[in-house]
Amino acid sequence: MRPTTPAGTAEWWRFLARVRTPLVLFAGVVLLGTVAFKVAWWPFGASWMDALYMTFITVTTVGYAELYPLGTVGRVVAIVVAVAGIGSLFYLLAAVMEFLVAQQVRDPLGRRTMRQRIAALSGHVVVVGYGRMGRRSAEELAHEHVPYVVVDSDPAVGGALQEAGVPFVIGDGDEEEVLLEAGLARARGLVVATNSDATNAFVVMTARSLNAELTIVARADDAAAVRKLERAGADRAIDLYTLGGRRLANTVVRPATVDFLHGTLRERRGELSIEEEPVAEGSGLAGRTLRQLDLRQRTGASVLAVFRGHETHPNPESEFVLEAGDRLLVMATVEQISALRRLTRP
């Protein structure tokens, strides 16, 4: 069986093959020039370092003064070394530039480097569709310091993302190869935000078949699309118009409440925030009541609700018994959430 060569090693060998001839030619000129100057300055007791130094300043046309006087033979040597050295040096530089230009033409968006960046990610979020909704979702993920990879079929999007330093894959999000290239098998979540409900449904079905544990949230344009996307495998499907209408109405009716909730969901710098914190197996919280745990006194975090599977227990009583796998919805500062995590994790 033929041994496989890593991509980086293969590129290195291709580079060496491209510059081998000019590199050997340049090294030969330097070697012969050094020997020639050594012979020309033999009466003056010049060292090999003196001869090598003279060769390099001649080849590079620096123009420093001669270390020792040059007779007719020495000047002929200098002319030959200068002509051959400059020619071989430019030949080497041209080969290097040709290789770099060929690499850029072959891979204009730096996909090889991008694949390496994505391969190093784990527990990230894949965002399919980089329109207005996808871009906004990506901004929120960046705000939360959650790593993400963008998938979009428009090459122009790739150029903008490359300039911004955002990992991306150019391709259709409903293709398995594209999603796998985006690291879907190692991802924690998927945001599907294309402008087509049909495309979103295909992306959801493809992603669910590749990763059964993935949390999938999809955009929908109406209530009917919500049901279809959930049947396709989405954990949540968001009807943008319904959600936006509720937000507008609630902002009119109860503006202070909306502002408070929006701030606690988004702010992370010393202000209150609302977070979900899972109760891990072996954390010591399972099998104990909220009264016994006294999380408010120990951490400062207020438990607003407990999620158990698909059930929600809002404002749980003090005798509520926690189980491993429960998710606590808490309101707390960053420091208080850190203190709570020390209790909820093993």
Image: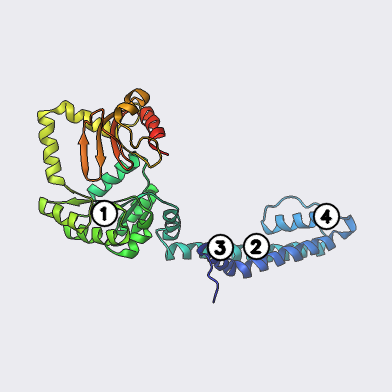
Residue 26, x across and y down, in percent:
67, 65
Query: Where is mark 1, residue-wise?
Result: 129
Disc 1 and disc 3 in contact, CB within 8 angstroms: no
Quadrant hosting residue 275: top left
- Residue drawn at (83%, 55%) of the image: 69
Residue 317, x across and y down, in percent:
23, 29
Quadrant housing the C terminus: top left
The answer to whether residue 273 is seen in the rendering is no
Instruction: Sort mark 4 into few (<14), some (14-19) or many (20+) by Cα contacts within 10 Å.
Output: few
Disc 2 and disc 4: Cα gap in Å?
Answer: 23 Å
Whichever of callouts 1 and 3 sits on the residue coming sooner in the sequence is: 3
Q: Secondary structure at mark 3?
A: helix
Query: Where is mark 4, residue-wise?
Result: 69
- Residue drawn at (30%, 46%) of the image: 138
Query: Three-letter amino acid code at disc 4?
Result: Pro
Q: Secondary structure at mark 2?
A: helix
- Residue drawn at (38%, 54%) of the image: 186
- Residue drawn at (9%, 29%) of the image: 253
Tag of residue 96: 3
Q: Is residue 103 left or right of residue 323?
A: right
